[in-house]
């Protein structure tokens, strides 16, 4: 059966759910539409609403809202586009859902990450499944699942009307970041309409000290101080309009969203985002029927993404390399000689999906979840000619790329008695991929002609049949102890860039980089899906009310067969020659390959209430420690971008409407680095953060200081510094400089409800 027919069937099921059955009347005083289906709670961690509120003024990067969850670390990227990592696995190895939509990054550098499509001010709930993810929550991933949701629709009491809203503004000193958000709702007891908008922008941020020589960012560009981190500026606007209808125990919601990012610099990529326009339509139904609960969703996301050299990177390339004293551009002549007007890179992504889930009781102790999911993804990635060697034709990096998923799952949850709860699930998923014929900038280059001809003659249609299995259990021997443990077999198929990028030209490979390490990458048509086998357990000790104290420890181990890592490319091409094989202190050229990997580690977290009811308020101490080790079992190398041992400790004071937090962040040196990528080691560091909030009935004030002592540090997952200069040339950008973290930053934010 064709994918379009299956999609039509799923949407028809969704529409059929709109025919409201006669069911018991909902309570008429309910104001907020509570979820009719809750995500399984085994092996999951929710970000507390207090944490979300506290961090909204401190960051414009939604991924950073997850940084206080044990086992989660953050990959550095653009200012609003960081990537979460769970137990050493990140990016496409995680299933990330925003309001139930499986968003896909339509970019060779993965600049438009899924979490960049929702502003921190719009996040009302965030849940992380680390390692073992129930099959009903997501597939096509091996590291875990992140669920981020905006606020649910609100309704008035019966016979009344509801009008409410919220307005917020913030400012952060480092980088002169500022922005605001607005939410407005008008509702009756059956109909709700909500508008949400947010906008944020910032200049380059400053590190805690000089890490380079001050000077022009590039010929014809502006001056950068020694402590200014180039290409860290950004501007982003997100807007959405949600219409919801409630009738008895049925809820229908249509949400339309648009994003406009006119610019976002990238300190660890050779290019910058010069435009990202996205439109989203998200239709969902939730209903309580006599037999159980039905949830259905259909969505579509269209993305138009552009990259070029931003303000801190050399634009004109030619015989004089853009070094004209007065900064005026040379005259482009086209053809193989003369100048190149930068390097325009464009992508067009179209992502359509539908999900149907049902939940019903088999007995008083057994709960069954069944469902299906379908996703159709199309991608074009092309680079218009700009002169010099990049002409006269359009370079097609990926032409008519296709990645379609079809999945079915079943999950059984059993409450055996008051102590034992188990959950077993199986998920079957088919991933079909293909792409059209490609071409280089010209046929004059023998390399372009030969490689494109070889690629076009190859069998590019791939089909993967993947199986996921999960087995989870929770044992509660008494009111002060809980043990969760389980096993998962999870599978992920390669993405389009891992399979279908085809040229080993040095410049081309450097532009296909999702790792932020400064190296160049080429795809591999023969890649197999990754298969991860994970075993983990969580031991939870706490007081009977889970308020006074708690200590949790989670050891885990994951073995991945056909792990998609990288090897130095080898061919007659000079970029992949002998020097590339032996280089240890330079950027190199790599090809994606299947190998095997082992990841293991330990997360420890806890809290203890020190004082309660004193005149100076309630005092609580919190702590978290995480360690993960990643090894390539095929080569003996270390896996890339693995967070070293790190810990956070905080003292939290609450006195009425006041809340104050002093946090210490400690990170060990990173010495286990990926040799094949020439990953750079980083030193250990310690930071202090001070945060405070004051909340009236309708007004909330947040103030704080990040990196209180203005400590200089290099973030272990920040990648290679490529934030300025002649970044198209691998030898013109110095190897060996990590992206430094942000220096001291004072922030303040005000939110007013009306």
Image: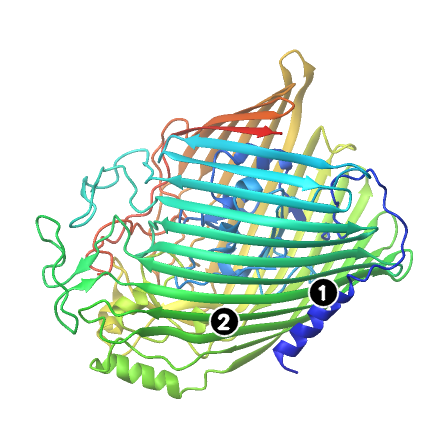
Which color scheme is applied?
rainbow
Residue 268 placement, left or right of 2: left
Residue 378 got which mark? 2
Give the class, few, some or many, for how many residues have Cα within 10 Å of label 2's Cα (few <14, many ≥20).
Answer: many
Is 45 displayed left or right of 367 in the figure? left
C-beta proximity under 8 Å, tags 2 and 1: no
Query: In the drawing, what numbered circle is on residue 683?
Result: none
Classify the position of the C terminus by image quarter.
top right
Q: Is residue 467 found left or right of 601 in the rendered image?
A: right
Q: Quadrant of residue 183?
A: top right
Residue 284 in picture, x, y percent from top left: 69, 58
Residue at the spot 34% in from the left edge and 68% down from the top edge: 590
Q: Position of residue 53 (x, y in %)?
A: 58, 34
Q: Residue at x 20, y 59 (%)?
A: 731
Quadrant of res 206: top left
Q: Is residue 681 above or below residue 618?
A: below
Q: Image quadrant for the N terminus?
A: bottom right
Which residue in the structure is indicated by mark 1? 356
**Which residue lies most toward the bottom here?**
457
Q: Is residue 653 above or below residue 238?
A: above
């Amino acid at each position: 059966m064709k994918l379009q027919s299956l999609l039509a069937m799923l949407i028809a099921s969704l529409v059929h759910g709109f025919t409201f059955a006669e069911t018991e009347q909902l309570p008429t005083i309910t104001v907020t539409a509570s979820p009719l289906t809750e995500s399984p709670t085994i092996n999951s961690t929710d970000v507390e609403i207090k944490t979300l509120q506290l961090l909204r003024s401190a960051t414009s990067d939604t991924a950073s809202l997850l940084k206080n969850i044990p086992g989660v670390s953050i990959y550095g990227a653009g200012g609003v586009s960081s990537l979460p990592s769970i137990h050493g696995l990140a990016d496409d190895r995680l299933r990330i859902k925003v309001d139930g939509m499986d968003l896909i990054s339509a970019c060779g550098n993965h600049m438009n990450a899924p979490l960049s499509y929702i502003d921190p001010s719009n996040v009302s709930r965030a849940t992380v499944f680390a390692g073992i993810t129930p099959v009903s929550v997501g597939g096509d991933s091996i590291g875990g699942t992140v669920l981020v949701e905006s606020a649910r629709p609100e309704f008035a009491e019966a016979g009344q009307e509801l009008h409410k809203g919220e307005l917020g503004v913030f400012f952060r000193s480092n980088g002169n970041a500022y922005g605001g958000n607005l939410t407005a709702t008008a509702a009756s007891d059956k109909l709700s309409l909500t508008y949400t908008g947010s906008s944020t922008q910032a200049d380059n941020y400053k590190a805690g000290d000089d890490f380079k020589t001050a000077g022009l960012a590039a010929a014809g560009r502006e001056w950068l101080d020694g402590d200014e981190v180039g290409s860290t500026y950004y501007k982003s606007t997100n807007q959405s309009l949600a219409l919801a209808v409630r009738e008895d125990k049925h809820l229908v919601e249509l949400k339309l969203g648009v994003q406009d990012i006119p610019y976002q610099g990238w300190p660890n990529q050779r290019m910058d985002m010069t435009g990202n326009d996205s439109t989203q339509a998200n239709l969902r139904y939730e209903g309580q029927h006599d037999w159980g609960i039905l949830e259905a969703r259909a969505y579509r996301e269209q993305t138009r993404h552009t990259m070029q050299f931003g303000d801190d990177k050399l634009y004109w390339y030619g015989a004089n390399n853009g070094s004209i004293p007065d900064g005026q551009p040379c005259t482009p002549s086209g053809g193989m000689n003369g100048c190149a007007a930068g390097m325009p890179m464009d992508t067009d992504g179209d992502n359509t999906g539908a999900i149907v889930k049902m939940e019903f009781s088999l007995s008083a102790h057994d709960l069954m979840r069944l469902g299906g999911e379908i996703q159709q993804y199309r991608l074009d990635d092309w680079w218009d000619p700009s002169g010099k060697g990049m002409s006269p034709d359009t370079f097609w990096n990926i032409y008519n790329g296709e990645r379609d998923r079809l999945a079915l799952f079943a999950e059984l949850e059993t409450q055996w008695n008051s102590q034992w709860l188990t959950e077993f699930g199986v998920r079957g998923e088919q991933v079909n991929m293909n792409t059209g014929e490609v071409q280089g900038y010209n046929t004059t280059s023998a390399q372009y002609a030969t490689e494109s001809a070889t690629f076009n003659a190859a069998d590019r249609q791939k089909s993967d049949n993947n199986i996921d299995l999960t087995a989870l259990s929770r044992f509660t021997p008494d009111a002060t102890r809980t043990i969760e443990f389980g096993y998962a077999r999870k599978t992920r198929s390669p993405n389009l860039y891992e399979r279908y990028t085809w040229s080993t030209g040095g410049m081309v490979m450097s532009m296909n980089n999702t790792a932020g390490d400064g190296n160049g990458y080429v795809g591999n048509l023969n890649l197999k899906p990754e298969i991860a086998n994970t075993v983990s357990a969580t031991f939870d000790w706490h007081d009977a009310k889970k308020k006074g104290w708690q200590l949790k420890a989670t050891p885990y181990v994951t073995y991945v067969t056909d792990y998609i890592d990288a090897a130095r490319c080898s061919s007659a091409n000079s970029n992949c020659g002998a020097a590339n094989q032996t280089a240890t202190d330079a950027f190199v050229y790599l090809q994606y390959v299947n190998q095997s990997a082992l990841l293991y580690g330990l997360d420890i977290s806890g809290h203890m209430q020190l004082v309660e009811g004193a005149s100076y308020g309630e005092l609580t101490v919190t702590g978290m420690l995480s360690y993960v080790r990643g090894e390539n079992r095929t080569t003996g190398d270390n896996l890339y971008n693995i967070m070293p041992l790190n810990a956070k400790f905080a003292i939290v004071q609450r006195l009425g409407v006041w809340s104050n937090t002093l946090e210490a962040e400690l990170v060990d040196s990173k010495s286990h680095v990926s040799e094949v990528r020439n990953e750079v080691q980083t030193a250990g560091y310690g930071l202090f953060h001070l945060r405070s909030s004051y909340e009236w009935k309708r007004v909330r004030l947040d103030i704080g200081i990040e990196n209180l002592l203005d400590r200089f540090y290099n973030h272990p997952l920040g990648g290679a510094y490529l934030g300025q200069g002649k970044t198209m040339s691998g030898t013109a950008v110095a190897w060996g400089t990590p992206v430094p973290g942000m220096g001291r930053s004072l922030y303040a934010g005000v939110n007013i409800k009306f």
